[in-house]
Amino acid sequence: MGKMGFSLVLALFLVTIGASSERKCILTGDWKNDLGSNMTISAVNEAGQFSGLYLTAVSATEKPIVESPLTGSQHVDNLEQPTFGFTVKWSFSDSTTVFVGQCFMDDQGKETLQTMWLLRVKAKSMGDNWNATMVGTNVFTRKLEEQNLGESVRSDL
C-alpha cells in the first residue's frame, strides 16, 4: 500500500473515531421491552439521577395493572454507553423490581437497553422466603427511534 492508500485508511479511521465519540446513548425518553412493557424515563440530572413511570404488560396479580413510579441513576463519567440501575415500586402489588443494565448504541445509532432484573414479591412467611425472588432479563428499544437520537437531554430533577 502506497502513501496515498495509507493516508486514505488513516483519514477514514480518524473520521470513524470522531463520529463514534459524538454519539451518546441517552436514557431519557419512551422505551418498550421484549414483553410489551412501556417505560418513560424523565430527564437525567447532572448527578445521573432520574425518575419515570413503568407500565408492565405482565403480572401474576389479579389486580388491574397501573403505571408505577421508577427511580434510578446512571454513571455520568462515560455517557457513550452508560451503565444504570433503577427500582420500580409496583403501585398495584406488594412487589418491587430492581433493574440493572447498560445502554448500547449500534453503528446505525439505534439505542438498546440490555437489562437484568430481580423481582421481589411479598412472602406470606419466613418459610415462604425461598421462592419470593425471581430473576430475568429484558431488552428495551426506543419507542420513537428519532426521539432524542444523538441529543443529550439533561436537567435537574
Image: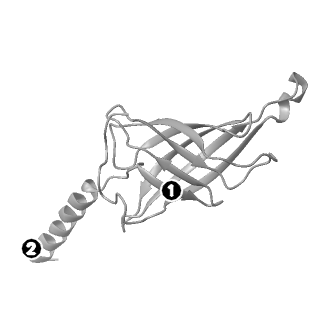
Marks 2,1: beta carbons within 8 A? no
Q: Position of residue 51 (x, y in %)?
A: 47, 38
Q: Residues within 10 Å of mark 2 (few under 14, many from 20)?
A: few
Badge 1 element: strand
Badge 2 element: helix
Rendered-image quadrant of the N terminus = bottom left
Residue type for callout 1: Trp
Q: Position of residue 107 (x, y in %)?
A: 36, 66
What residue is drawn where x is 80% and y is 45%? 61
Where on the picture, by quarter, is residue 128? top right
Where on the picture, by quarter, is residue 124? top right
What residue is drawn where x is 9% and y is 76%? 4
Rendered-image quadrant of the C terminus = top left
In the picture, measured across the screen, residue 56 lies left or right of residue 103, that is right
Residue type for callout 2: Lys
Query: Which label belongs to residue 119?
Result: none
User: Could you say which is closer to the camera, residue 153 or residue 7?
Assistant: 153
In the picture, measured across the screen, residue 127 lies left or right of residue 139, that is right
Q: Position of residue 148 (x, y in %)?
A: 34, 57
Of the residues under marks 2 and 1, which one precedes in the sequence? 2
In the picture, measured across the screen, residue 7 lies left or right of residue 145, that is left
Task: Name the residue beneath numbered marker 2.
Answer: 3
Numbered marks: total? 2
In the picture, measured across the screen, residue 6 lies left or right of residue 60, that is left
Task: Name the residue beneath numbered marker 1.
Answer: 31
What residue is drawn where x is 83% and y is 36%? 131
